[in-house]
Image (tube, rainbow, N blue to C red):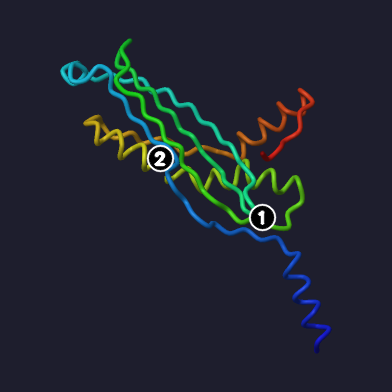
Amino acid sequence: MTDQQNTAASEEETAPQFSLQRIYVRDLSFEAPKSPAIFRQQWEPSVGLDLNTRQKALEGDFFEVVLTLSVTVKNGEEVAFIAEVQQAGIFLIKNLDAASMSHTLGAFCPNILFPYARETLDSLVTRGSFPALMLAPVNFDALYAQELQRMQESGETPTVQ
């Protein structure tokens, strides 16, 4: 019976583990450079979205992943507002091979963070008295695959800082 318990404990120690520890806003900004004049104009917005992720190894098997969403909304040629959120999470990730770890940090974790970042931006924009900003879902798996292909073509290798 002891051998079975030791084998089970050994398998548990080497089994892949993933656990979300904390989700938080790392940085948040909002600027409406043309207010209040912008509120008196016909509203015909164009939305520009920049998206970025980065990850950092913390102590042990803990990692911080930061998803940055930057939105610039123009009304005609004038900037109506600029909003940015850095939504972050701390994740416990153990016993993954290099490819799985790269995919987890580059796609899986940002998928978890995106709904929080989207809601934070929407709330920020409506507090600025602008119409709700409902960003479409993002396919982080496809973005990750594109980035891997770009890195392979340029001879780079994915790294965690």
The amino acid type of the residue labelled 1 equals Asp
Is 143 positioned to the left or the right of 158 in the image?
left
Q: What is the crowding at mark 1: few (fewer than 14 residues within 10 Å), some, or many (at least 20)? A: few
Q: Is residue 4 above or below residue 26?
A: below
**If the image is split into quadrants, where does the C terminus sit?**
top right
Residue appearing at x 73%, y 58% in the figure? 95
Q: Which quarter of the picture shows residue 127?
A: top left
Residue appearing at x 64%, y 46% in the figure? 57
Q: State the residue in front, 18 or 108.
A: 18
Front label number (1 vs 2) = 1
Residue furthest right as drawn: 3
Is 29 positioned to the left or the right of 101 in the image?
left
User: What secondary structure is found at the residue carrying circle 2?
Assistant: helix
Residue appearing at x 71%, y 26% in the figure? 150
What label sits on residue 119 in the rendered view?
none
Q: What is the crowding at mark 2: few (fewer than 14 residues within 10 Å), some, or many (at least 20)? A: some
Q: Is residue 138 above or below residue 14?
A: above
Residue furthest bottom as drawn: 1
Q: Which quarter of the picture shows residue 75?
A: top left
Residue that badge 1 annotates:
61
The amino acid type of the residue labelled 2 equals Arg
Residue that badge 2 annotates:
118
